[in-house]
Amino acid sequence: MTDDDMRRKDKNVAQDAGTEHGNKTEPEGDHPPGYIPDPHAEVLRSLPRLRSIKTDLDDKIFTPPPPMVSRIGGVTQGCGGVLLSILGAVMLLVAAWSGYYLWGPGLLLGGGMLLVFGTRGVWSGRINGIIVSSAVIVAAAVIGYIWQSFIQPASRLAVSLNPPLNYLGGFLEIVAMVLVLVLMITMIANVVALFFWKRLKVLSPFGLAIWGGIAIILIALVLGANYAQQQARKDWLNDHLDTYMAAADDTSLIMGSNANVTLGYNFVTLEEGDDPRLDVRLAEVEAGVEAGAAIIRLNASGDLLQEAELARMFPLDEDADDPEAEAQEAADRLARQIEVEQVFMDHMQESGVDMLIADAQYSPYLLIWSADDDADEELTWEVFADVQAWRVEHYAQTYQPAYYEIVDDPQAYGTFGDIDPTNEDDADEALELWAAQTERLIGIVHDVSPDTQIGVTISLAEGAGDFAMRYYEYVLGLDIDFIGVRFFQPAALERIEDIIDEYGHPADFGKELWILETWYGYCLAPQRSMELDATWLELSAAFAASHNISVVLASDYGCFVQEGGTLFQSLDDSDNRTPIWERWRDVIAYWQG
């Protein structure tokens, strides 16, 4: 067979193939003279569109795989859904525990679940999944913007709760930052797939209706749970307020607030210039004084004084080019910080209210020291006991406070470093060590500030174990004036009643029982009901009056100055006073007047 015969045969095959699929090859006249068609290319050109090909087995229309951008969107959406669910779950648990609204975290959790369940649709290139996921991401962005001020407090509060929530809480802010990036990538991929690709699965109105129904049900459940929770909180507070008011006698209470200040590290700054924290803390003190507070409580750690003796928080660089200049810079920094601290203390003493100084549980200086394996001296219990005795003596002698809380819950000291013997297996030895240390501190304060009344704080936590109650029983027999408690949850009220019933009231031993810190949760962000917070303060005073408690100090966290507090938010107006401050002022006038 000649070459011409072979070419004619290939041409006929191509024409037959095209005819078989319902297509005709282009006539020879359409090609330039001498053109020799490629039979394989002609066969490929003659094939119909892939969408119209039917399989022989199930008679279904073949659809091509989704574009790569949908795969990218599916992967990132799956990750984003998991992260959003974690963020929402932690925020929801903290909100439920600490008195915040539930609707924001609940909707974020629901949105995360929708993203997780919709991941397969996005991966497969389904238009329904892409539309639903994009709508959820937009809604989550709006809710997240409204609730962004709650993320940092939720992270801090989650750390104080039980595992595994405390571990997740430590990474909550990082999760939020990564989540924003992941959902941005998801949104970009979805937009590209939706508007620039034609190989997506067809839109299903019925499927969209199902997704919309699920979303509506989730929203209704979350909003209903929020309403039910708020109503339950309100009913509980009002019912107990009525009960305590009915049982309260006519004796007066001493009312006050906490300054949210720890002498020793609260005013530490690296840069020169005005410290905005000083203005904030002064504004909080002013709000308390204007409300009629008789006592203002603050903590003292002595960190700046220890840093001046031996730098640990800001150690000097031994290899610095100019060691003398660096040493002078460190000295100037400490001088600035001590000066700011003194301005605050001068204002406190000029305010006319009695000052209660509490020994600080938390000390950055000691925490760094305990973690330093190369420290010149190991921070043992004996060393810590000497440091504590030294700082109590310093502050008692320097400021001659009306009251000194020499031990602020023994077990809490060990939370911030390996300096507490209460975590040892031998509970008897731990009690002996703290008992001896408490008596030592009592003697120090009596020597340097004879007019100062002395007290300690015990833990109300159920997990405090036997040590807390054994320590309580022990201090009932010491030469102290008051025993303090702090509570932020309704369950603590019943716990106080149980302790009094089982171990006796301090009044039976010639001592007073004080509420040193209280609030309805922690007012660290604006997503909470100020009405419920105000009712809680009323309830706390009524509870104190009905249980022979002498003093009630509120921990407002700056919420007397602005809703949401000042610890995690900048101060907008130092002269502002919130409705809850007005209620607190009325409570003080009622019980202290």
Image: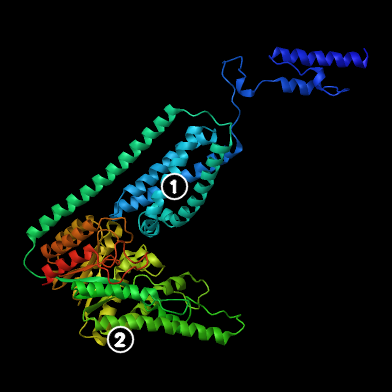
Q: Quadrant of the N terminus?
A: top right
On screen, residue 549 versus residue 94, left or right, reads left
Q: Is 160 drawn above or below residue 436 in the view shown?
A: above
- The residue at 28%/84% (across/down) is 399
Where does residue 114 sit, x and y in percent of width and height? 42, 39
Type of amino acid at the residue the image marks with label 2: Thr
Image: 302 above or below 541: below
Query: Residue drawn 21% across and 86% down?
Result: 450
The residue carrying mark 2 is 398
Q: Is residue 359 something that shows in the picture?
A: no
Which mark sits nearer the N-terminus, 1 or 2? 1
Figure colour scheme: rainbow
Quote the CA–CA distance across marks 1 and 2: 51 Å
Q: Is residue 472 above or below residue 404?
A: above
Residue beneath disc 1: 84
Which residue occupies the foreground of this view, 456 or 293?
Answer: 293
| Residue 523 occupies quadrant | bottom left
